[in-house]
Amino acid sequence: ALLDPALHDCTMNMKLFLCISVFVLRIASAHGYIETYPPLVSSENVSDPLYLGLIMSFGEAFNSSGTVPGVQVALDLINDDPKMLPGYTLHYMLTDSQCDQTVALEAFFDQILPEHDPTKIALMGAGCSVATEPTAQISHFYNINQISCASSSTELADRARFRAYFQMLPTDVDLAAGFAATAVEYEWKNISIIQQNENLFIYTVDRVQELLSNANISSTLQSFESSEGVLSLRDTLVSLKGARIYYLAMYSSNAKVVLCEAYKAGKVYPRYVYLTYAWYTDQWWVPAEDDNIPCTREQLESILEYTLAFTQYPETKNTSRITDEGISHMEYEERYRRRLQEQSYSYIVNAEHCFDGIWALAYALNRTISAMMEGLNGSNSSPLGLDDFTYNSSAVRQLLFNYLSETDFEGVTGPVSFNEDGIRTVSRLRVLQYRKINGSLALAEIASIMGNTLNSEFVYQEGEDEQTVWPGGVPYDGVPDQVTISVHVAVTSIYSVLIVAGMAFAVACLIFTIAFRKKKMIRLSSPNLNYFIITGAVAMYASVLFYIIPVLSEEAATVTCNVGPRLFTLGY
């Protein structure tokens, strides 16, 4: 254990529970590669193999295994390009994290333990934010640079904790501007938020609520623990008074449950609408055999239609333009879809981020190879190769880290570069909507949001507008519209004088009737009926005052709005 770099100085650099996990898994981890790609070929003419540790999630909480074909497409292009990695071929060795912290650590040690040779030059994973956090926190102890293409938690944007980590997705907190800008665009004044208590969602929801508050938009929050499931909120899940616009901050497995409950409650468009994420896997709403959800596919599709979904990439709109990788987004998509048909994986939008992530690593490895051939760090020592890398090679790790930090190229997802925390930068958010296209439910891009602040510009795509997005009208947010009507002071003064004069005349008639009630003429007019008529006239005159009296407080407005019409009706 003392020879294990992850355990050395463990108490100084890691939380106690993580240290214990490292120690236990370091001993108990068992070899569990799912596959190696490209397959190794025994030949004297074959280039030296470099191995990448690939950790993806095949779990139910979040299944990122659909990124694997995207990685394969990238490796094929890189290994076939004579300018890339001269003298080497790049292979991945795949393990499964199940989108679980403990399983992810086990998968990590499956990749790097000495008895599980060969040595990995870098790591891509670990399939989702929950699984990536513990692995990224210890990977630098093994001098391994780690790239993630399916994680976006704000928790990971911390270079002090995650010292050798790079992220192909911007943090999900950047999406907060998308949710807020959309609420402003459609003049929604109340948003109901249902949050799964995971860092990935907590930070985003906090930012969303901050932006909504700055825009004078109210929000209500319900949260649940992942271990308890969203049905722990069953009593109030979709029954909040006045709630019409729901933001589902959760993994797709829980979003499916919420939509089923909403369907059973009849909460469908145009009276209700839902906001969620566009990074869910393809066909995520289709009930699986073990889902135990009392809704059919057709029922879930009926409520999911018109739902809005948000994502950051791809940033480029020209899908036919050739990128620095020598391939267009359109051609990449064709190759990726072809791989999906050949293998038992499901489509996921993160695959293209993994494709660009492999290229980012390859470009950095190219520069590292050149630097090492010239003499490691400018020293006079004999040239070394990447195949000489070990988990004690801190100089090689630093070289690769530096070149990854300087990443700057045009990929299929747009410009690729990292900030000081190793997180992908973003300038455009995409707003998509679930629609029936050729009889099938699919996502269609409807707008872009430029920037990541409350004042971000909401721009419709060509051919889209409010009518095409909301054919049944913009969903009502449940907040009554307040309309202020002002009356000129001269009109108010005239009416006030007439009201006082009318009331004075009515009172004079009342006094006259009482004073001369014994006179024959007055008795013939029925004095008691006169009293009743005069009292009604005074009440009707008085009711007008409640319409013209200016009020500033909500309490006063409540009184005047209720008393005025009732007094008028009573007087009549």
Image: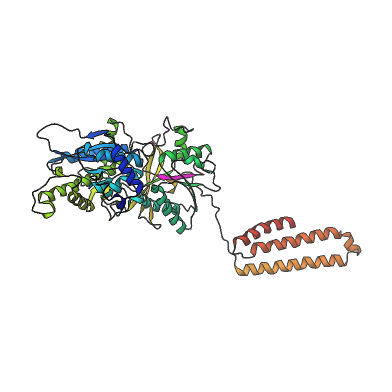
In the picture, the quarter occupied by the N terminus is top left
Question: Colour scheme used in the picture?
Answer: rainbow
Residue at figure coordinates x 74%, y 61% from the top left: 539
- Compared with residue 194, is residue 207 higher up or lower down, i.e. above or below? below
Q: Is residue 344 left or right of residue 514?
A: left
- Where is the C terminus found, in terms of image quarters? bottom right
Q: Residue furthest front?
A: 2
Q: Is residue 35 above or below residue 374?
A: above
**Nearer to me, 28 or 538:** 28
Give the magenta range.
270-287
Question: Which quadrant holds residue 509?
Answer: bottom right
The image shows residue 138 at horizontal and vertical percentages of 28, 47
Q: Is residue 469 above or below residue 510?
A: above
Question: Do we see residue 333 in this rendering?
Answer: no
Residue 456 shown in magenta: no
Q: Position of residue 519 (x, y in %)?
A: 91, 65
Indicate yes or no whether the magenta region holds residue 281: yes
Is residue 227 visible from the viewing direction of this image?
yes
